[in-house]
Image (cartoon, rainbow, N blue to C red):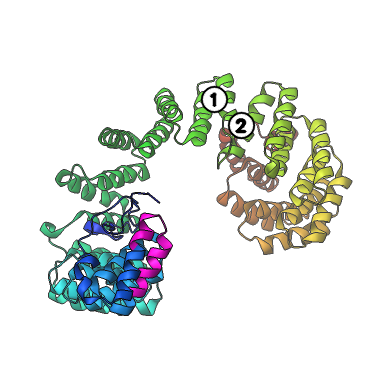
Amino acid sequence: MNKYFSLISIGLILSGCQALSPSTEPAADSTAVTSTAQSPADNTAQFTPETLVSLLTAEIAGQRDRFDIASDNYIEQAQRTGDPSVAERAFRIAEYLGEEQRALTSALIWANAAPDNLEAQRVAAIKLAQAKRYEEAMQRMESVLQAKGDTQFDFLALSAAQSDRKTRHALLQSFDRLLSKHPHNQQLVFSKAILLSEDDRIAEALQLLEDQPRKYTVVATVLLRARLLNQLDRGEEALPILRNALKHNPDDQRLRITYARQLIELNRLEEARAEFLELLQQSPEDDDLRFSLALINMDLEAWSEAQVYLEDLIERDSYSDAAQYNLGRVFEELQDTEQALVAYKAVESGNNYLAAQQRIVALLLSNGQLKDTSTHFEMQRLLNDDLAIQLYLIEVEGLSTYDQVETAWLRINQALKHYSDDPSLLYTRAMVADKRNDLAQLEDDLRLILRENPNNAMALNALGYTLADRTDRLDEARQLIEQAHTLEPDDAAITDSLGWVYYRLGNLATAERLLREAFSAYPDAEIAAHLGEVLWQQGKRAEALRIWKQALKTQPNNSVLSETMQRLTDKEL
């Protein structure tokens, strides 16, 4: 707490939706904010000596940063005296300290003691809304509206948006009643639209906003209208609305950001970049905008421009890990492997850390730096013991991908010495065993996983597919894969396995149906290989070739696809 905080002058910038802003975060300035409340010192004649001593103690406690004592004394005296000035002071202190129940209690005492004080009524309404006492909040806010004071119905609606259906409907009836008297009050219009949208009546909410005469439109209703259009998959219609609002409010950052994001949503990246540049010129210290510009430039493959923004963020010590990770991606695109590695290795934590490790293993092994790979991951496991399993998995999968199968085998066994029954490590060892053609080890590891978790769909599918593809145990394979499919019916990889086992069983019609379903959901090269083979065996060779060629465009190095095409086309030739 700021040592200059004075309870004599304490105040608060109230939370809410000023100017219909959806933000509900309270201001948190610990410096003194001048309060308009009458000081208790001005009312000393009406207080008992005990009350005066208690309030004086509270003031001294506040001067000494003992705000707990100050809060205790003020709430006690507010309840004892019912004095509006003391109650307001109790409210301001409780709100500052985040004491929600005391803030509500003191706000109600203040509002009841000063029925003509619109600020007191508005504050009480907000605290009641936060306490989910929406009907009482509505009554308080309505009294402020009738007195032509500043209302915050929008805050009330936003607070109630996630409430139960019955509460929302009751509030909607209240808003309808008020709108019949104040049809163009934009807070009421906005509030009703919010509640309608939360009730899945999106088209009705949009119509309410569109029916408003343009002269009454405010920024918040424009933003809500754009959001509703997006929910209805009519994002293109939002652009002219936002653009027109920007003409009348060129300095409104919320509008410009929404417009820029709408352009991104519609893949109009050049225009979005121009808008973000304008925003950054308006707010040159805003690193959120700077990071957005870096990502947009990356999407536009403007690598050098992206590099400038990312290096600027790093220099400003902002978005550091995310900036370093994306800078690594930029350097990869610029074919500067050395600088890419430097950037990825600078990612020390956060959401991008493991992704950076995946890129490091790929870059090192693609350049034949096997020893450097081992050294790097040994060090990372020492530095990040809590991520050791994930780091083992990344290293082993990288080694396996780059044909370092025996090193991968040594490393996964090293991992299992430390974490003996970890299912992800066992599964990975099974996949490495598959590459070593050690089907006995693969089956042992997958069955060990299934003993602990019989409904592990991934292990069921892996074992079933291997048995279907590499052995004659086809009925057993079908049972395993069907169990996995029951657990995960929408998983394209499992559907592919099921199609493949039916192919191996000779049921080509069922195999084709399942493989078409899998390929439609996930047009992967391996699924394309399987579907093409089934079509080929049924004489649908032109379609098989078309599917294979389509898959080759995106995954030209897929070994399963290459082997399938060579085996079948060579045989035919």
Mark 1: amino acid = Glu
297 over 202 or under it: above or below: above
For mark 1, what is the residue? 332
- Please tell me which residue lies in front, 473 or 77: 77
Q: State the residue at coordinates (59%, 19%).
A: 338
| Magenta run includes residue 72 | yes
Residue at 61 percent of width and 31 percent of height: 359
| Residue 129 appears anywhere in the view | no
Q: Quadrant of residue 435?
A: top right
x%, y% of residue 350?
Answer: 56, 41
Say which mark, if any, is on residue 359.
2
Q: Main secondary structure of the magenta part?
A: helix
Other-residue count near label 1 (Cα within 10 Å), few / some / many at <14 / 14–19 / ≥20: some
Q: Are marks 2 and 1 in contact (CB under 8 Å)?
A: yes
Tell me the magenta residue range.
Answer: 59-77
Q: Is residue 256 above or below residue 73?
A: above
